[in-house]
């Protein structure tokens, strides 16, 4: 940076001094055209000099604005165009900086500073040939530091390409990282190469993140039509990798679009042609499978998905879709097998986890269920916990009295130990996911029973209380560790906590295993995991979040999904007042309220839904202050309906509103938590 600034000062040593009117247009004059051009050029130099001063201070946005004004006055000023490129570089807009340097050279082909900048920029972009060309043109003697950087990046890029040809994907990742560390820190091509290498290593989320980052770079500005990478035209390679990632993630339409663009850019490339055929064959198989599935032709759909898997044997979506077909056909083992294949590819794939849990709910062999949880742990951490796996596979604790006496009872309150039973027995005897008719309509909806919600929250509270003193579970939580009394007391048994090497990752693992236990319990109780209500499904996803923080624990144990149905009206009214009244008292609070309202779930048909419900439309139609289709009025409608019905002690109203807009209370709680305001409410005392 200092070198660039110094060079700019040398370039403009003879410029006019900066005056207080540097950014004020010159007064009109009556001189002839030549004199006017001279004055405009002089003023442009003065504005450019002001831009240089802002650049030195690190105010790149302001510098860019001034350079733009100077160029508007004098468009053919190569030095100003070059300085604009420097400001763009400071803002991280490397591709646009390349374009400006190219324009500077068009104006003045002998402008050495533009060649110097282009050398540095092309190194950052990973364009070795372009960088070499401009390095040789910048000066008779190449800058030794730039030459060394260029040679180092070139070395790592060469190794990366060789490893790609050999299919040595871990080496590709290592060399990509080395090239970035050596100077190619803005290379979309290297990010794409990383994404391609991550796919065969079954690191799908990381691959998706890498190609997404590559797409955000202003690459089209910087890439010439003939730039090559890995034997591809560079822009075609980006679309080629994007198609692979989209296909792996199940975005089949996007994959087809991306490979079509790659084919347009590089029509004769054999790898592009092969991938084009593959992507379109997989997309056709998936589309046909979906049509057959929706028509109830599950056996034929299995065959269609199988054809797609022949083309792409590592497609998690096709395995999961075929698992859904096996489930419909009652072939639970085959469904579990396909779910396992999908999870081997993508261990956190929620649909496969839910489908497998649903299968276990249908299967009679209970011991397989906790074993599956241990297998999920193996997928996430790289290897199974052998001791825990053996203990899980012995027998379900509630079905083996002789096994109970060997359990560690340190985590049980002995005064309440009498009457405790294994939660599996409880789940078999008590439905946890129930279907409820919606008053005022012919619809039905699914929700968790209050007892199921109480168990979920109690287990989360047990984990949170130990995390607060830096303790975590010594082994993954299993169904057999959970015990419950007839009065609803929940205890853990046969497992302990430790503070040794406590970390945020240990905390996250505890909640991930809790999510699996909860899904299995719902399945054992006869519930269909695929019919979870939206707020509880969001709660499960929160438990699985790989970025979970200590602050999120408050949201876990005070999640709206865990509220008893009878308490939801009270909580809604409390939070509504918090948003509309309390947050409106200060300027900062008003800004928070605006952000919260913008996040509330809003669909254009919500008012129509309310009017159509004969149970609540009396509070919607013929009102003095007519409702508009806005988030604010959706909140107002819910508040008014709840207030009126609550006055009449009508407990059914909450189930009606929960069915019609299940996400509303959930989003209110999430938004308040994000703004740091949920902890200031009394929500933690509303769970009964």
Image (cartoon, rainbow, N blue to C red):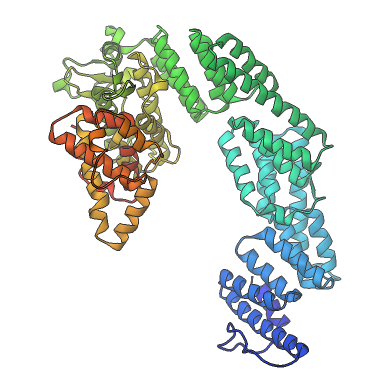
Q: Position of residue 268 (x, y in %)?
A: 84, 37
The residue sitting at the front extreme is 622
Apparent side of residue 536 relative to residue 316 in the rendered image (left or right): left
Q: Residue at x 62, y 17 (%)?
A: 305
Position of residue 218 relative to residue 139, above or below, is: above
Q: Position of residue 397 (x, y in %)?
A: 31, 12
Q: Residue at x 47, y 19 (%)?
A: 355
- Occupied quadrant, residue 644: top left
- Out of 50 and 660, give the one closest to the viewer: 660
The N terminus: image quadrant: bottom right
- Occupied quadrant, residue 500: top left
The residue sitting at the right extreme is 140
Position of residue 97 relative to residue 328, above or below, is: below
Q: Position of residue 405 (x, y in %)?
A: 25, 12
Apparent side of residue 130 relative to residue 557 in the rendered image (left or right): right
The C terminus: image quadrant: top left
Position of residue 246 relative to residue 585, above or below, is: above
Q: Position of residue 358 (x, y in %)?
A: 43, 16
Apparent side of residue 334 relative to residue 602 in the rendered image (left or right): right
- Out of 122 and 65, give the one closest to the viewer: 65
- Residue 475 visible within the image: no
- Out of 349 and 158, give the one closest to the viewer: 349
Q: Residue at x 22, y 48 (%)?
A: 577
Count of numbered circles on the image: 0
- Residue 647 visible within the image: yes
Position of residue 397 relative to residue 344, above or below, is: above
């Amino acid at each position: 940076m200092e070198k660039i600034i110094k060079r700019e000062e040398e370039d403009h040593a003879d410029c006019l001094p900066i005056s207080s009117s540097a950014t004020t247009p010159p007064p009109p004059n009556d001189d002839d055209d030549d004199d006017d051009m001279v004055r405009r050029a002089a003023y442009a130099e003065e504005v450019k000099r002001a831009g240089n001063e802002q650049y030195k201070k690190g105010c790149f946005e302001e510098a860019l604005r001034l350079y733009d004004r100077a160029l508007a006055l004098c468009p053919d000023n190569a030095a100003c165009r070059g300085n604009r490129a420097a400001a763009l570089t400071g803002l991280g807009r490397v591709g646009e900086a390349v374009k400006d340097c190219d324009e500077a050279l068009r104006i003045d082909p002998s402008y050495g500073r533009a060649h110097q900048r282009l050398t540095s920029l092309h190194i950052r972009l990973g364009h070795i040939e372009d960088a070499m060309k401009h390095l040789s043109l910048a000066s008779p003697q190449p800058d030794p530091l730039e030459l060394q950087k260029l040679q180092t990046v070139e070395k790592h890029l060469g190794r990366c390409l060789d490893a790609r040809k050999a299919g040595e994907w871990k080496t590709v990742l290592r060399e990509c990282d080395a090239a970035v560390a050596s100077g190619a820190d803005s290379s979309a091509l290297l990010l794409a190469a990383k994404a391609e290498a991550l796919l065969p290593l079954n690191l799908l989320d990381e691959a998706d993140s890498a190609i997404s980052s590559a797409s955000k770079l202003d690459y089209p500005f910087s890439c010439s039509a003939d730039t090559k990478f890995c034997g591809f035209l560079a822009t075609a390679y980006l679309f080629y990798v994007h198609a692979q990632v989209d296909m792996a993630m199940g975005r089949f339409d996007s994959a087809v679009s991306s490979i079509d663009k790659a084919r347009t850019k590089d029509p004769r490339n054999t790898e592009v042609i092969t991938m084009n055929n593959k992507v379109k064959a997989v997309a056709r198989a998936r589309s046909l499978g979906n049509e057959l599935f929706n028509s109830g032709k599950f056996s034929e759909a299995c065959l269609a998905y199988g054809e797609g898997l022949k083309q792409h044997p590592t497609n998690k979506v096709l395995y999961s879709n075929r698992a859904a077909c096996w489930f419909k056909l009652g072939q639970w083992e085959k469904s579990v097998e396909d779910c396992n294949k999908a999870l081997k590819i993508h261990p956190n794939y929620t649909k496969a986890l839910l489908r497998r849990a649903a299968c276990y709910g249908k299967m009679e062999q209970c011991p397989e269920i906790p074993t599956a949880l241990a297998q999920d742990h193996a997928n996430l951490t790289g290897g199974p916990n052998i001791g825990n796996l053996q203990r899980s596979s012995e027998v379900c604790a509630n079905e083996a009295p002789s096994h109970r006496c060997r359990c560690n009872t340190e985590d049980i309150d002995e005064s309440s130990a009498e009457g405790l039973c294994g939660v599996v027995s409880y789940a078999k005897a008590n439905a946890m996911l129930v279907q409820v008719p919606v008053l005022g309509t012919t619809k039905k909806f699914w929700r968790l029973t209050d007892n199921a919600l109480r168990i979920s929250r109690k287990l989360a509270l047990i984990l949170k209380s130990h995390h607060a003193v830096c303790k975590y579970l010594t082994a993954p939580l299993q169904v057999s560790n959970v015990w419950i009394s007839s009065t609803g007391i929940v205890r853990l048994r046969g497992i302990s906590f430790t503070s040794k090497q406590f970390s945020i990752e240990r905390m996250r693992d505890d909640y991930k295993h809790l999510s699996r236990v909860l899904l299995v319990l719902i399945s054992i109780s006869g519930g269909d995991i695929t019919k979870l209500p939206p707020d509880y499904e969001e709660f499960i996803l929160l438990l699985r979040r790989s970025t979970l923080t200590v602050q999120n624990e408050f949201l876990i144990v005070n999640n709206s999904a865990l509220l008893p149905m009878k308490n939801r009206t009270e909580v809604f009214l409390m939070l509504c007042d918090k948003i509309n009244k309390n947050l409106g008292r200060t300027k900062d609070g008003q800004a928070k309220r605006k952000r919260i309202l913008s996040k509330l779930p809003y669909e254009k048909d919500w008012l129509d839904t309310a009017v159509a419900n004969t149970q609540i439309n009396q509070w919607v139609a013929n009102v003095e202050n007519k409702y508009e289709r806005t988030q604010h009025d959706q909140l107002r409608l819910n508040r008014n309906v709840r207030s009126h019905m609550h006055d009449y002690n009508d407990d059914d109203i909450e189930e009606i509103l929960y069915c019609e807009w299940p996400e509303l209370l959930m989003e209110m709680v999430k938004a308040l938590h994000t703004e740091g305001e949920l902890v200031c409410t009394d929500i933690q005392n509303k769970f009964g």
